Amino acid sequence: MADRSTAAVGVANEGGEASPSVRQGGATSDGATTDDQTSSNATADRTPEEQPAPASPAAAEVPTGEGEAIPEDAAAPDAGSEGADPDETSAADAATGADADGPAEEGEHGTSDGSPEDPAEATAEHKPEDKPGDGADPTLHVSRHDAAEDTTAVVQTVDPPEPELSAATVELTPAREPAAEPAVEPAVKPVVRKPPRELHSGHKLARRYQLEECVTRVDGFSSWRAVDEKLRRAVGIHLLPADHPRARGVLAAARSAALLGDPRFVQVLDAVEEDDLVYVIHEWLPDATSLADLLAAGALEPHEAYQMVSQVSQGMSAAHREGLAHLRLDPGAVLRTVSGQYRIRGLAVTAALRGLTSDRPQRQDTESIGALLYACLTQRWPYEDDAHGMAGLPKGVGLVAPDQVRAGVHRGLSEVAMRALVNDGATASREESPCTTPEELAKAVAGVPRIRPPEQPPAYQQAVFQAPAPPSRGAGRAPMAAQAPPPTLPGRTGRALKWAVSALVIVAIGLGSWQLADTLKSREDQSTRTPPTGQKAGQDPTHAAPQRFRIAGVKDFDPLGDSSENPTMVDRVDDQDMTTYWQTSWYTTADFGGLKDGVGVILDLGSVKKVSAVKVSLLGTGTSVDLMAAADGTSGEPTALDSFHKVANGSGTSVTLKPGSKVSTRYLLVWLTHLPPDSDGHFRGRIAEINVTG
């Protein structure tokens, strides 16, 4: 260690005290410098202007007795500069050695930046102690320790024995307030969802619906086939947790669909929220087959495709009038019953379950119906991607008309399909306006000329609607081949039977010929007889045979309901085929559920005719029917029930309605007033054939 020299300079006059930051000087209690300090070489070489800025505003200036502040660099000059007295330096060393514990105690109460912890200490004033031979006793000393290569400037303070407050006070800058801590937001408690209840076959809901088979399980919900044990019938159930984000929307959609009550839709029976589950109960049609299964066997016949698009478009038109949309009309959403009626399932509910929305719901449903018609005509999906078990169109070709994809497609239905799909109504033959709503599509279908049903049912109907064979026991067993018809009777027995049948036929022909000859002879005898006395001349004693009238048009008539009662089937009452029929919608009771007095069909005879009888062939026991006639002077087809008056009534399966006298009219109304029960527990009327005679 080199020679040590110490210099002390007084920096405070009477009536003031040095700043706490200057008093502490950044030194620790043992005299060593902190990390924030600079090296001793840099401190020794710097001029007062190059010294670092004070740590706080209070340390930048030291007040004097007259209230004037002098700079810190002037108050504490370098030990080697002019004005440093060696005697004062020695006295400073002695004071430092005597009060070595003073800075340590002060450093314990100061803050990290060297300022005192209590702001009141910064305003304390000490009266300087008189020293012989000197005007004022300095309270701040600067000591300098010179080492071999570096010099460290240590600033230490000497506490006066008993400081006294002076008459004058010096205003110092208050200590900086601590920064406000950032506000801590309260923690959001996470929503703890209960795990969904495990459901399995045999589980019972509401002590009534027993789950049988899970049909679908996707996207947080499941669909089941179940049994209503109270009414002993099959039902379908959609299940999802009550805290599912779509649960509220599913309940609202189910309740809206249940209010529609249109028989062309699979009816919603109930919508329930129970405990932690939300479930929707709907009809289950065990005798119905989806359109996807029908198309798996091949394209449909034109008549069947016409029935499908007509019934589906009319049903969706009625739904959109009530503000309901489907948004997922695909081959799996359309069902065909054994009676030939098409039913739509999942109205509004399917879209709510899957979270589907659309800005143009009518256009989307119309396009979906057009895609269904396209698939029925061609067994191809009208887009490039394969879907629903059918191949799509060739890529890059675009939309091709159905009659160009497959031979034998009905031209009118092909144009209707193109108008319903997104192609601006362009068809292969001419420009047609596109159908943008189901109602426009239904009108376009109604404009297609009537398509006659085939003489024999197509193969897919025979295959699909037959009862399934019971499963064979044992795996890997080959299916049993169809039994061949029994062989003809062999030998003499067969030949004898043939001769016996031939003889019977000959005898029957002989008897028939003899009876016919006898009848003709008796008629000749009657014609040659002289008319009895008193009979008017020129009067024919025999009555003329009744004349059968041709029916020019048939229309369904439902003035007390929605003005529509299966209009696509009404032509069957005049097709001379007893195996086909027109049927009403289903109702819960025989009196139409109390909703109306009846429904029927209007017969247009083409012109005013004198009607003597109307024969109506009905299906089902317990049907009651009235015959009504419009006034003779009616020019147009009546639209109100009051335009007709009752002329006859009857009940049964084959009813002949005879007015009291011949009725002259052009329009007749066959009006059903009581319905027979159906096999599914509902009530529905059916008319197979109507004949009008005069």
Image (cartoon, rainbow, N blue to C red):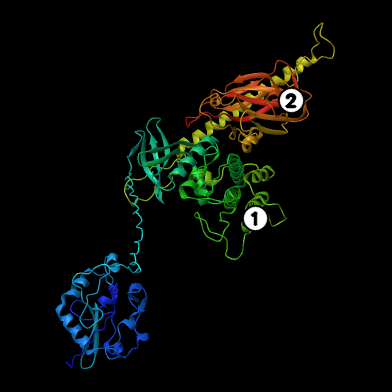
Q: Amino acid at mark 2?
A: Gln
Q: Residue furthest right?
A: 537
Residue 35 located left or right of residue 389: left
Which image quadrant for residue 45?
A: bottom left
Q: Position of residue 294 (x, y in %)?
A: 52, 48
Q: Position of residue 251 (x, y in %)?
A: 45, 41
Q: Callout 2: helix, strand or loop? A: loop
Against 231, is 365 above or below?
A: below
How far apart are the two marked residues, 1 and 2, measured between alpha carbons?
44 Å
Q: Position of residue 448 (x, y in %)?
A: 68, 45
Decide if residue 552 is in sight here: yes
Q: Callout 1: helix, strand or loop? A: helix
The disc label shown at residue 547, or none: 2
Decide if residue 465 is in sight here: no
Badge 1, how many Cα within 10 Å: few under 14, some, many 20+? Answer: some
Against 551, is 625 above or below?
A: above
Against 392, is 413 above or below?
A: above
The disc label shown at residue 403, or none: 1
